[in-house]
Image (tube, rainbow, N blue to C red):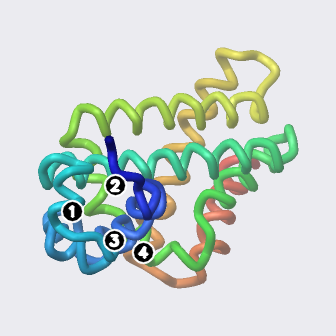
């Protein structure tokens, strides 16, 4: 008979995601994961098999969370170009801008290297573009073209903010997106 899990996978993975954000994917060992989660290394091996699958499970959980955040922002944002800006800004709360610009890049590197994680990232991008496109144009092809541009500008604005930091992230990135809409 299988043992009942005392701590659900989602809770373990959320805890380990915090650890990965601090250490980077390479820093997540079974010993460190055990200390963070309160589970024994043997239990973690039973759940995930090896360290690489444990890291992958953590990052897939992060994509699950981003998918849910994107769906919620899509529901909340107005069906207008200004709503597209609001949707993107909801995905980048000011309190996480620093972490996303620094430690988040370690996760992105891993996401690009791993085919399963890369596929999740691509699926999220297409979903995000669809949500933006509906707000940017009544013409689906035009909306899609504009949505890819807007998503690229959003990511670029975040990256350049990380270097310059001349104003708060929320203000800097929103200003760039709104300026793009005005052009």
**Marks 2 and 1, how far apart at CA:** 9 Å
Q: CA distance from mark 3 to mark 2?
A: 11 Å
Q: Give the mark nearest the N terminus, 3 or 2.
A: 3
Disc 2 is placed on an element classified as helix
Question: For the residues carrying marks 2 and 4, which lies nearer the camera in this image?
Answer: 2
- What is the C-alpha distance between the residues marked 4 and 1? 15 Å
- The residue tagged 2 is 58
50 to 158, vertically: above or below: above
- Residue indicated by mark 4: 99
Quadrant including the C terminus: top right
**Residue matched to label 1:** 25
Q: Earlier in the sequence, mark 4 or mark 1?
A: 1
- For the residues carrying marks 4 and 1, which lies nearer the camera in this image? 1
Q: Position of residue 119 (x, y in %)?
A: 35, 30
**Residue matched to label 3:** 21
Q: Badge 2: how crowded within 10 Å, few (<14), some, or many (20+)?
A: many
10 Å crowding of disc 1: few (<14), some (14-19), many (20+): many
């Amino acid at each position: 008979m299988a043992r009942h899990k005392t701590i659900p996978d989602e809770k373990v993975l959320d805890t380990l995601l915090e650890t990965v954000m601090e250490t980077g994917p390479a820093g997540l060992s079974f010993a460190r994961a055990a200390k963070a989660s309160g589970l024994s290394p043997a239990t973690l091996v039973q759940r995930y098999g090896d360290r690489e699958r444990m890291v992958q499970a953590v990052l897939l959980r992060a994509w699950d969370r981003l998918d849910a955040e994107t769906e919620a922002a899509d529901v909340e944002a107005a069906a207008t170009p200004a709503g597209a800006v609001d949707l993107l800004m909801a995905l980048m709360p000011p309190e996480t801008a620093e972490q996303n610009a620094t430690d988040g890049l370690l996760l992105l590197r891993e996401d690009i290297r791993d085919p399963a994680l890369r596929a999740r990232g691509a699926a999220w991008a297409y979903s995000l573009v669809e949500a933006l496109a509906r707000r940017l144009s009544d013409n689906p092809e035009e909306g899609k073209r504009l949505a890819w541009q807007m998503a690229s500008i959003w990511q670029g604005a975040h990256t350049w903010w990380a270097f310059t930091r001349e104003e708060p992230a929320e203000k800097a990135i929103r200003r760039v997106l709104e300026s793009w809409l005005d052009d």
